[in-house]
Image (cartoon, grey):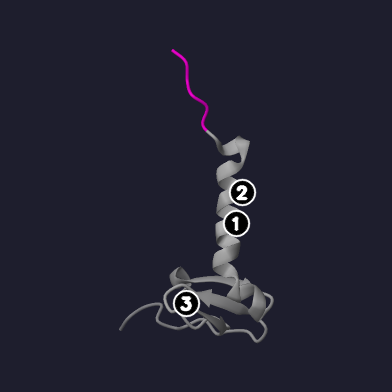
Amino acid sequence: MALFKRRTAGKPGEYYYCLKHGTVEEGPECRAADRFGPYGTREEAAHAMETARERNEEWREDPRWKDEPREG
């Protein structure tokens, strides 16, 4: 008997972007490791990859996270 096989029930109005299938799903259908979300709208979920790219770029350019060359 396998433990933790029960799937999470989705909630109406919560949308996820499935990384494995490249689709938007209402309520979690795929496993958590394969999805982004939840998002409030289907439109937000559809743009999940674009949002992730923009955030990654912002973090990459944030001076608080840049390593400064060490002297000595």
Q: Position of residue 36 (x, y in %)?
A: 54, 69
Which SS class for mark 1? Answer: helix
Disc 3 target residue: 22
* Callout 2 secondary element: helix
Q: Residues within 10 Å of mark 3 (few under 14, many from 20)?
A: few
Q: Quadrant of residue 63?
A: top right
The range drawn in magenta is: 67-72
- Amino acid type assigned to the residue bearing label 1 in the image: Glu
Query: Marks 3/2: CA distance?
Result: 24 Å
Residue 32, position as x, y percentages in the image: 48, 72
The relative height of residue 66 versus residue 31 in the rendered view (above or below) is above
The structure residue drawn at horizontal position 47% and vertical position 83%, both measured from the top left corner, is 7
Is mark 1 in CB contact (under 8 Å) with mark 3?
A: no
User: Quadrant location of residue 24?
Assistant: bottom right
Q: Amino acid at mark 2?
A: Glu
Is the residue under label 2 in contact with that under label 1 (CB below 8 Å)? Answer: yes
Q: Are marks 3 and 2 in contact (CB under 8 Å)?
A: no
Q: Residue at x 52, y 27 (%)?
A: 68
**Residue assigned mark 1:** 54
Tell me the SS state at disc 3.
Answer: loop
Number of other residues with Cα within 10 Å of mark 1, as a class: few under 14, some 14 to 19, many 20 or more: few
Q: Mark 2: few, some, or many residues within 10 Å (few <14, many ≥20)?
A: few
**Pick the front one: 68 or 13:** 68
Kindly identify the amino acid type of the residue bearing the numbered disc 3. Answer: Gly
Q: Quadrant of the C terminus?
A: top left
Ranked by sequence position, the earlier of labels 1 and 3 is 3
Residue 3 coordinates in the image, percent (x, y): 37, 78
Per the rendering, the mark at residue 58 is: 2
Q: Position of residue 49 (x, y in %)?
A: 54, 66
- Of the pair 23 and 37, the residue shown nearer to us: 23
